[in-house]
Image (spheres, grey):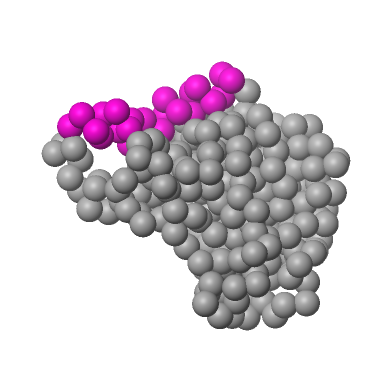
Amino acid sequence: MRITEPETEHLLKHGYVIVPDFLTPLELAAARENMFRYYPSAEELSATPERYGGLLEEADSLQNEFPFAGDTLNHISTHPELIAFVEKLLGTRDVLLSQAAIWAKYAGTGDFEQGLHLDYQGNSLVVPRDDRAFRQVNMILYYSDVTDDMGPTCVVSKRHTKDRPLWPPFRTRKKDAALYKLEKPVLVKAGGLLIFGMSTFHRASAITADFGLRLSHHFVYRAAQHAFQGYHQWSHFGEKQEMQDFVESTSPRQREVLGFPKPGHEYWNTETLAAVQLRYPKMDMKPYLQAAQAEAGS
């Protein structure tokens, strides 16, 4: 696995871990190419700012959600290595991708400074429990180098916060200056991965460079059994052509983490097999047909 046992131990001890070079060079190049379908390069923005006036007006909110145009970002969102890691960490095969979004930040275009916070408010109506299948797994994958002046994510080890209450989830520098003294910036090369928990304090920092572009890809995974947690149900995007294309082209396991019934699930019968094939004519239905036939013959 690309995420090692020592890295997993660091995550469990500190509430976060940095996995350098998670992506292969080929995966990284393809992901960056896919990102530039959504965002101009820093050079393009600088050369023709009038073309991107809207982008400059919304500099602090340049996010796009899964599913994406071009399948590279979709496949990375459901990367087999990420799925295998989450399965092992949560102790269950039934895991779901509950959030995936890409984000671009340009130097000199906005104020990206955040206060230290926890992410759980938009992912649960309760508070986080970071053990076994109750754990939600946050990840940020970086598609550009993150240096001190390019707005690194800052994190605080859970060793320093274990006795702090989970509510409120936001802590200001004015009221909790001591917490800010404990943070560490995540400095990472493109292709690196940050994994952290819902009860890990973190924040985005300001971009102080005069020129540059920061590209990142954000995910949350959770256990399927705990439906009181989770940001999205992907059927909400079922009418998008990007979702149609990805469902048709991907593997059964990747579909499962989007909430698609796995081969052998009781949902599948003669009628649903035929109708789903009509909805997704380019999808290989053999795994579902073969599992249904095996079930019928047992």
**Looking at the image, how many numbered discs can be counted on the residues?**
0
Left or right: residue 209 versus residue 220 is left
Name the residue nearer the viewer: 155 or 72. Answer: 155
Q: Position of residue 219 (x, y in %)?
A: 57, 49
Q: Is residue 85 magenta?
A: no
245 in relation to 205, above or below: above
Left or right of 50? Residue 222 is right
Q: Is residue 136 visible?
A: no
Location of residue 187 with respect to 204 vertically, above or below = above
- Between 250 and 157, which is closer to the camera in this rendering? 157
Q: At x 49% / y 29%, what residue is drawn?
A: 31
Q: Which residue, as the protein is rendered here, is positioned at the far top?
A: 26
Tell which of 195 and 228 is nearer to you.
195
Residue 272 position within the rendered picture, expressed as x and y whole percent measured from the top left: 54, 46
Residue furthest out toward the left? 50
Q: Main secondary structure of the magenta part?
A: helix
The question of residue 34 being in magenta is answered with yes
Q: Find the magenta span and give its range.
A: 25-48
> Does any portion of residue 17 appear in the rendered image?
yes
Who is closer to the viewer here, 85 or 189?
189
Identify which residue is drawn at 70% across, 38% down.
19
> Who's the residue at 35% across and 49% down the image?
62
Name the spot of residue 264 as percent of width and height, x first: 71, 43
Image x and y of residue 275, in percent? 48, 42
Question: Which residue is painted at 64% across and 64% down in the image?
Answer: 181
